[in-house]
Image: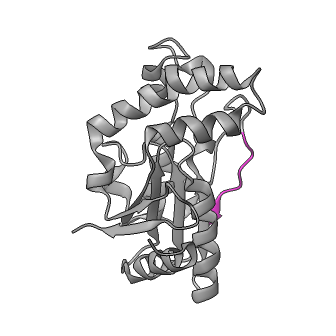
Amino acid sequence: MADRAEVLGELASDVLAVQRSHPVRVAIDGCSAAGKTTLADELADVLRGRTGREVIRAGIDYFKRAPELRTAYPIDSPESYYFEMYDNDAIRDRLLAPLGPGGDRSYVVGIRDASARSVLDSPVQTAAPDAVLLADGAFLQRRELDEFWDLRIYIHVSFETVLRRGTERDQAWMDSPAAAEQRYLNRYIPGERMYVDDVHPADHAELVVNNEDPAAPSLTRRA
């Protein structure tokens, strides 16, 4: 395995190699606690150090549906998580499509806070023609969104790692470590298994980062 700086440098080279007549839209996809946000932030820093192009960061956790609109399944079920949590229409219409072919490059980086309970007052911004968007989140290669990405990076960790890291991270805002663990076992991991079984994101992405050891990740390129 390479060290983290080396992998980030390779990812930056791959991103900058993508040529489009519009902003380049990069998905940083993966399961919960895979390290998507941290890697996206670090990659943005590397890109800003290498190029004068505008680098846009967006977190898809700020494009969730309001809880009261998730009515097809029990709110704490894996089905609600996979099928209802994210507002794919807003991700497409307010972030990805405007940055793509024929778009006006006007976008927002979120519509609700991370809890989805409050509407964000996100300003409409205009991207430079050669900007790079790094968007991190879950389920980014769903069929509703897949055609709108110019490059897909999948951050792979095992579900055992998802459970361990997610429990350690989320126990701070939940009642106990046991409650956090059960939330992953009953909701997040089953929902993410649906996605993996349905989409096969690691096979579909152009770049796969094995992030089991964040200090020494490995990068695989796919044809």
Secondary structure that dominates the magenta span = loop
Task: State the residue in front, 207 or 63.
Answer: 207
Q: How is the image coloured?
A: one colour
Is 79 above or below relative to 163? above
Identity of the residue drawn at 67% across and 20% down: 179
Relative placement, left or right, of 69 versus 207 is right
Q: Quadrant of residue 14?
A: bottom left
Q: Quadrant of residue 194?
A: top left
The magenta segment is 120-126
- Residue 122 sits inside the magenta stretch: yes
Can you give x and y, in whole percent of width and height, for residue 117 in the image? 71, 28
Identity of the residue drawn at 60% across and 79% down: 46
Is 43 above or below relative to 203? below
Can you give x and y, in whole percent of width and height, for residue 49 in the image? 64, 85
Work out whether residue 57 can be spotted: no
Can you give x and y, in whole percent of width and height, for residue 166 in the image? 61, 37
Can you give x and y, in whole percent of width and height, for residue 221 in the image? 31, 70
Relative placement, left or right, of 167 versus 191 is right
Question: Which quadrant of the figure contains the N terminus?
Answer: bottom left
Work out whether residue 72 can be spotted: yes
Is 86 above or below relative to 213? above
Q: Residue at the far left: name it.
A: 223
